[in-house]
Amino acid sequence: MLDDLSFFQKVGIFVQPIILVIMGIYGPKSLRNVSWAMLFFTLTTYLFNLF
């Protein structure tokens, strides 16, 4: 799966969930629920793409 991706796409796969966790913990209250929902969506998408 990772062989077909460029360097920036590979970095984005690992950086995006970290940013969403930081936003979910320390972000403004109006964005916290959205950040957790986006993290759940991102991780389930990665999981479905693995199998």
Image (cartoon, rainbow, N blue to C red):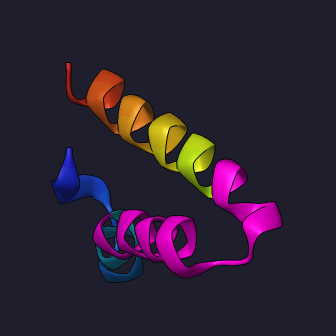
- Quadrant in which residue 48 is drawn: top left
Q: Is residue 28 above or below residue 14?
A: below
- Assign the N terminus to one quadrant of the image: top left
Percent coordinates x, y for residue 12 in the rendering:
40, 73
The image quadrant where one finds the C terminus is top left
Pinpoint residue 50: horizontal percent, then vertical percent: 21, 29
Of residues 27 and 12, which is closer to you in this image? 27
Q: Is residue 33 left or right of residue 2?
A: right
Q: Is residue 21 magenta?
A: yes
Q: Nearer the viewer, residue 29 or 48?
A: 29
- Name the residue located 27 percent from the left edge and 55 percent from the top edge: 4
Q: Is residue 37 left or right of residue 43?
A: right
Start-end of magenta stretch: 14-34
Q: Quadrant of residue 5?
A: bottom left
Q: Looking at the picture, tell me which residue is in the foreground, 3 or 40.
A: 40
* Total marks in image: 0
Query: Does 25 lie within the magenta span?
Result: yes
- Give residue 37's position: percent from left, percent from top: 60, 41
Residue at 71% x, 51% y is 34
In the rendered view, would you say 12 is above or below 34? below
Q: Main SS of the magenta segment?
A: helix
Q: Residue at x 73, y 77 (%)?
A: 28
The residue at the far front in this view is 29
Residue at image point 48% right, 49% down: 39
